[in-house]
Amino acid sequence: MQKLKLTKWTLFFILILSTIDMSAQNNVGKVHHLDIRQQNFVAISALTAIGNIEKLKTQLNIGLDGGLTVNEIKEALVQLYAYCGFPRSLNGITGFMQVLEERKNKGITDIEGKEATPLQDSSDNYERGRKTLEILTKIPQSKPAPGFGEFAPRIDTFLKEHLFADIFDSDILDYQQRELVTISALAAMTGTDGQLQAHIGIGMNTGITADQVRAVFEIIEKMVSKDQAETARAVFSKMNK
């Protein structure tokens, strides 16, 4: 009788543990078609874009502990100035400097990571940026860009020469990582639906999947707000119609 009771209790606990494990796997699967490094890129980018520096500092610590290098985070924060402006980018960089100093004082040694490979292509910056944009969009890019580029040629020059040449030339982040950073920032901000739609398309050209895009929005819901995540989901839903 005692052995029978012991067997029943053993089976009961095995069942409970199996249920917990399956639940945990389902929760991870819901958000985490993104690996831990990608999740951290998303959270850091979103919090930088909305200017929540205190929450960003916490996430920067999590990102460093989760395997992001100092140079990878710096590169993401630099790129973000093109999407959320110098003030948010500089505030993020300043916050990151403070985080690194605090970690150093605690005896934590963070991995600097690789430096950018010296540029071999000496071609015209505009042409290099135009070709990069063609690779990303898989669409021929005219000079200047129609519409805004014809109306304000200087902004077209800045877009091609600086963002898609000077910034995207650095191989510290690859194109897919850069688009993940951009999508996360645009999804976190208001008034950027058109740009978000464009960059989701570009991101998927780099290999980001529909499930990964949805996972970005799950993180936006957690880090920013449900309303903002729903706005991003609506943009993505229109793309699939």
Image (cartoon, helix red, strand yellow):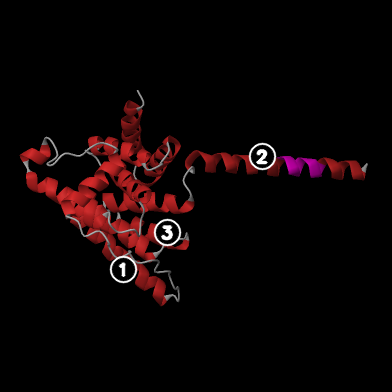
Alpha-carbon distance for marks 1 and 2? 43 Å
Is 72 placed left or right of 83 in the picture?
right
Q: Are marks 1 and 2 in contact (CB under 8 Å)?
A: no
Q: Quadrant of the N terminus?
A: top right
Q: Amino acid at mark 3?
A: Gly
Horizontal and vertical percent position of residue 22: 63, 40
Residue 97, numbered label: 1
Q: Which residue is mark 3?
A: 63
Of circles 1 and 2, which is in front?
Answer: 1
Under mark 1, the amino acid is Met
Q: Residues within 10 Å of mark 2 (few under 14, many from 20)?
A: few
* Residue at the extreme left of the image, as rendered: 151
Q: Earlier in the sequence, mark 2 or mark 3?
A: 2
Check the image and report above or below for 20 versus 100. above
Q: Earlier in the sequence, mark 3 or mark 1?
A: 3
**Residue contact between numbered discs 3 and 1, judged by CB atoms under 8 Å:** no
